[in-house]
Amino acid sequence: MSSPASPRSTWSNRWAFILVTIGSAVGLGNIWKFPYMAGSQGGSAFVAVYLICVVLIGLPLLMAEILIGRRGKGNPVSAMLNVAEETRSSPWWGIVGWVGVVGALLILSFYSVVAGWIVDYLIKSISGFRVETAEGASAAFKALLANPLEMALWHTVFLAMTVGVVARGVISGIEKANKVMMPGLFLILVLLTLWGGIAGDMGAAWDFMFAFKAHDLTPGVMLAAVGHAFFSLSLGMGAIMAYGSYLDRDSSIASTSIWVAMAGTLVGLLAGLAIFSLTFAQGLEPAAGPGLILQTLPLAFSHMPGGQGFAIFFFTLVLFAAWTSAISLVEPFVAWLTERLGIRRPLAAWGTAAAVWILGIAVCLSFNIWSGYTLFGLNLFELLDFLTSRIMMPLSGLAIALFVGWAMGRHSVVDEMQLQGKAFEAWYRILRYLAPLAILLVFFHALGWLG
Ligand code: PFF
């Protein structure tokens, strides 16, 4: 077994694990990506498929990923290898761990750039930034995208903040940071949603998100929704596996996962409602793409009483959400470096940051100087997003379902899951049949292989 010689850390208690896992799940995906994806991918059709995917595929996979991490007691690569060895499965399963670790770093490279935009807007809001018209809001965002130095600066700051936490360790870094930021995030979100209800157009937001229109449902929208269900629950990228490896044997994986999935989805929906209420109240288009919250919201904030305060609240909320997620993207590789190569944690963390930083700089340039370099019509930023959320995450999720459902063997799964009766059977069947089939169907359909 490739387990570490030194004893592994364990979360202080079950709630600490729930909190850090919600911290990983709730992030830019819920507050930045979800609204613009829903806005450009058919609104309620996207939301409906997304919710179905979270319950039917995301939640079972979340449980499976925690299960592997806890059983394997190691970073994602070692955890996969350890469980494969214990259950006499092929060591090739270790590749799944690698896809996760590498995928997480690829995500972090553009995640940190987007989080950098948020830091930029937070600082601007504090110094009284206002935009009067939609054109002004879009010009301000375009000016940021056109300025690689400004973007690189905030990307560097955000990455340093993230890695600084991971370098301090699992309990005194990751757990502590989440214990401070997550309650703050919930509080700010509730305030903002209330405000969206008072100052915005909640009715229009509700219709846009929940009045289901079947004709908007296309294979492309379905793949986007499946991909987003994975992204928003942090699945398939080793983050959950790494966090699960620090979970003690007494905590129930099933109920813990239900908490995480419910809280993550709720935060996403609340953020969506708040953001669309303000967007529609200003008569703005929800399909603005990745710049959506950075164009519509500053405009909304500028036109409302107390707007500056709310802008500061809002960007702080997004920053906390992004920060706790980014931390979970760094941990899998840092854990591998410390456990497998014996590198000290601070060095491992800062070394990882250096590699991600370089790729992030290329992402900053892909919006301006290098915007002419594209592959399949996508710039580097879009390519990294597409590769990770629409290809690596679904495939890795598929592999995890097959591993727990078929390769591990029922005995080990039952022993680790500590769940009995109908609930276990339903979960196990979903992993064996429904999840793999659904992922494959949507995947091939979207690639045009099923017509
Ligand atoms: N779930 C995070 C979000 O919604 O922003 C993003 C993420 C974190 C994806 C960690 C994958 C991951 F491993």
Image (tube, rainbow, N blue to C red):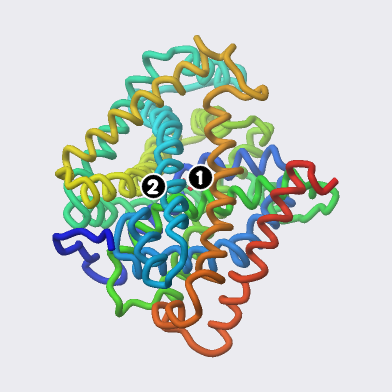
Q: What is the number of the mark on residue 29?
A: 1
Left or right for 398, reference 66 = right
Q: Residue at x 35, y 70 (%)?
A: 71
| Image position of 149 with respect to 433: above or below | above
Work out which quarter of the rendered image holds the N terminus and state it. Answer: bottom left
Can the viewer see residue 191? no
Q: Secondary structure at mark 1?
A: helix
Q: Residue at x 47, y 53 (%)?
A: 96
Q: Earlier in the sequence, mark 1 or mark 2?
A: 1
Left or right for 297, reference 341 = right
In front here: 284 or 262? 262
Tell me: is circle 2 under 8 Å from ligand 1: yes
Task: Give residue 82's position: percent from left, percent from top.
Answer: 34, 64
In front here: 174 or 10? 10
Q: Residue at x 21, y 48 (%)?
A: 338
Can the viewer see residue 372? yes
CA neighbours of label 1 inside 10 A, class few (<14), some (14 to 19), many (20+): many
- Label 1 with label 2: CB-CB less than 8 Å: yes
In front here: 227 or 294? 227
Left or right for 41, reference 19 = right
What residue is disc 2 on?
325
| Image position of 263 with respect to 314: above or below | below
Tell me: is circle 1 under 8 Å from ligand 1: yes
